[in-house]
Each structure stands twice: as C-alpha cells, then as structure tokens.
Image (cartoon, rainbow, N blue to C red):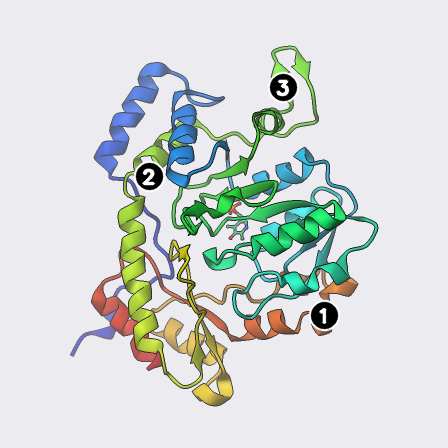
Amino acid sequence: MENIDNREPITVTSPLLPPLDEFEKYLEDIWQRKWITNNGHYHHLLEQALCEYLGVEYISLFTNGTLPLITALQALRITGEVITTPYSFVATTHSIWWNGLKPVFVDIDPATGNIDPAKIEAAITPRTSAIMPVHVYGNPCDTERIRTIADRYGLKVIYDAAHAFGVRVNGRSVLEAGDISTLSFHATKTYNTIEGGALICHSAEMKQRIDHLKNFGFESETEVVAPGINAKMDEVRAAYGLVGLKYIDRAIEARRRVAERYRRELAGVEGISMFEPRPDVTYNYSYFPIFVDAERFGCTRDELYGRMKADGVLSRRYFYPLISAFSPYNTYESAAESNLPVATRMADQVLCLPLHHRLTDSDVERVLSFIK
Ligand SMILES: *Cc1c(COP(=O)(O)O)cnc(C)c1O
C-alpha cells in the first residue's frame, strides 16, 4: 500500500521552466552586454520570435498581462462603458475600472464559457465604446459575430487572450481578431516569462503608440507624446522567454495527452460534463474544466474540490466567484444574478483539473479516482 502522507501534492499547474544551463548562457551574454532593460537585444529577439511562433505581425512585450489590457483601452481612447464578461480572472474588469470606465457585464454562452454574442446588443447604450471579451480557457470567441456587432455600432474590440497563447482557428491565429489582443505570460500560464505579457495589434502606427505608452509616453529623449506608464519587459525575462519558447510545443503536446485522457475517461460519467472541442480549432490545452451537476453526480462541486484537496490534489474553481460578484462591481445593474444566469450556474459547477506538462500517468489516475 502506498503511503498517502509521502505522496507529493498534485498541483493544478506547474511552470514551464527553461533548462537552467541553457538559460545561464543567455545570462552570461546579458552580463557581457551590460544592457538589462529598455528595449534591449533580447526584448527585440523575443518580439520577433513570438511574431513568428504565433503568426502575428505586431507584438509589444509587457511586464505582465494586466498592463497590456489597461494600455489597450488607453491606446484606443475608449470612453464611457465597456461591455465585458463576468466569467474571467478579475484583471479583465479591473483594467476597465483603472481607466475610469464603467464595465457592463453580459452573460456567457454555455457551450464555450465566452461572452454570448446574442446578448451583447441589448447591453449597448449611447455611452458604449468598446467590447472586451475573453477567450476563456483558450476557447475562441465567436469573433465574426462580435465583429459584425462592433462594426454596426462603431465599437472597438479588445480581446483578453490571456488563455489563448498559440490557439488557432482554421490554421489562423485567434490573436488576429479585434483591434487589439493581449496575452499573459504569468508563471501559471501555458507559456511564461515568470511575470510577463504582450499586446498584439494590426498596424505599425498602433505598435508605435503602444510602445510609447508602455515607456512613460517618451517618443524621444526630450519629447513625451502621451501620459504613458512603465510596463516594459526586461532583458532577463525576455531571454528566459526565448529559451522557454524552444520547449513550448513539447509542453503543449504533454498537456494534450493529459487532456485527452481526462476527456476519454470522464465521458459518460453521470453528472459530469465538459466542453465539446471544435474540429477547426488548434487548442493549447491550458485548462481542463469539468462541470459538476450535484444532483446527478451525487455530491457538490465544492465537496469534490474539498475531498481532492484534503488528499493533496489541487484543482481550482476557475472562475468562481464571478467578477461581477466581487464588492467593487456587485452593485452595478448588470452584475445582478438575474442578468447572468448561465455564468452563475457555470461558476457554481466548474472545477479545473490539474493540467500541466509534468503530470504522470499515475498522477492522472489519482485525479480521476476521485471522480469515477
Ligand atoms: C492571468 C490573466 C490575466 C492577468 O495576467 P497577469 O500576467 O497575471 O497580469 C488577465 N486576464 C486573464 C483572463 C488571465 O487569466
């Protein structure tokens, strides 16, 4: 019999760490160059490498994944109200608040967890100037329908693509959609630079504006063209990101194998449901959410979560509570549960299972043993 107390906990995620000896060579070079931040050699190389890897034309690196959201709203000069989803990480809505704008929550589509395009129009007012959807778990939003609505009302679209690193639809990057998309390279994400992020836009002029904004608004040594912020990525993390990029495909492949095993083994388990994958989407397997219907499954999501945790299996209730339920936002009219029935149910049922590149077959079996 295995000694339960000696077993390592199984974490929901584990950072993709570049091999130390390889990273050290980059560090030595940075030390030689004596240039450690402010648009350096590795900053430039990582922007180029990511453009190629992701299949996009313009990318700006950031020091985390929240500042590109805040900067995107500035760059597009958004005013008034921004339509968004309550089913995300709090940074999505916080970025709206930090710009002095009003978030307006719209319910989600039960098939994807993303903002429901059919419910967007009813939330548009004369003060609305943008839509900020999230490709939650890396599930692509219905970008064409969102664009049609945005065009009809003259709205900008900013995608929080923090979960969608490398995700493609019919072979094309999901980051091509909208006016701007943003990524997070936080340690918990599929691809990481410890802390980090990026902004993807679609013109050289916009990239230049973004690059000014992330560097205090400096255009030259003596000219400031906008009230910018400091959101730059340094050389050490850019180099870390370059090494990590060599290993990302292997990590995603390892995640895919775990996700497909979960899917196979949980299909048909009474009271457990999962999202249906789309054949035209290349996923990054960043999360594996399951939905627990307490009546049919025989215990609640929180009971299952608690049992797993007590035995060292750390799943996460992403995204519970809803952003709209937190005190800065819960007094908005659009935050009412009656406006968000699908999101409310999903938040009550969701459990994201451990999913990362280091999970072994026996780890996966241990996770599954709680559910089957
Ligand atoms: C992680 C995350 C962010 C914030 O990224 P940081 O790099 O942690 O600042 C924003 N939006 C979503 C949906 C996220 O999951």
Give the spatial CA distance, label 1 vs label 2: 41 Å
Comparing 119 with 293, the one in front is 119
Mark 3 or mark 2, which has the lower sequence index?
A: 3
Residue 201 lies in quadrant: top right
Comparing 221 with 343, the one in front is 343
**Image quarter hosting the N terminus:** bottom left
Q: Residue at x 68, y 36 (%)?
A: 76
- Residue 242 x %, y %: 34, 33
Mark 3 or mark 1, which has the lower sequence index?
A: 3
The outermost residue toward the left is 1
> Callout 2: few (<14), some (14-19), or many (20+) C-alpha neighbours within 10 Å?
many
Q: Residue at x 57, y 53 (%)?
A: 143
Q: Quick check: 114 above or below 221?
A: below
- Residue 71 x %, y %: 63, 36
Give the spatial CA distance, label 3 vs label 2: 30 Å
Residue at mark 3: 218
The label on residue 339 is 1
Front of the two marks 3 and 1:
1
> Callout 1: few (<14), some (14-19), or many (20+) C-alpha neighbours within 10 Å?
some
Q: Residue at x 50, y 64 (%)?
A: 318
Q: Look at the numbered discs 3 and 2 and tell me whether their residues touch, using CB distance below 8 Å.
A: no
Residue at mark 2: 245
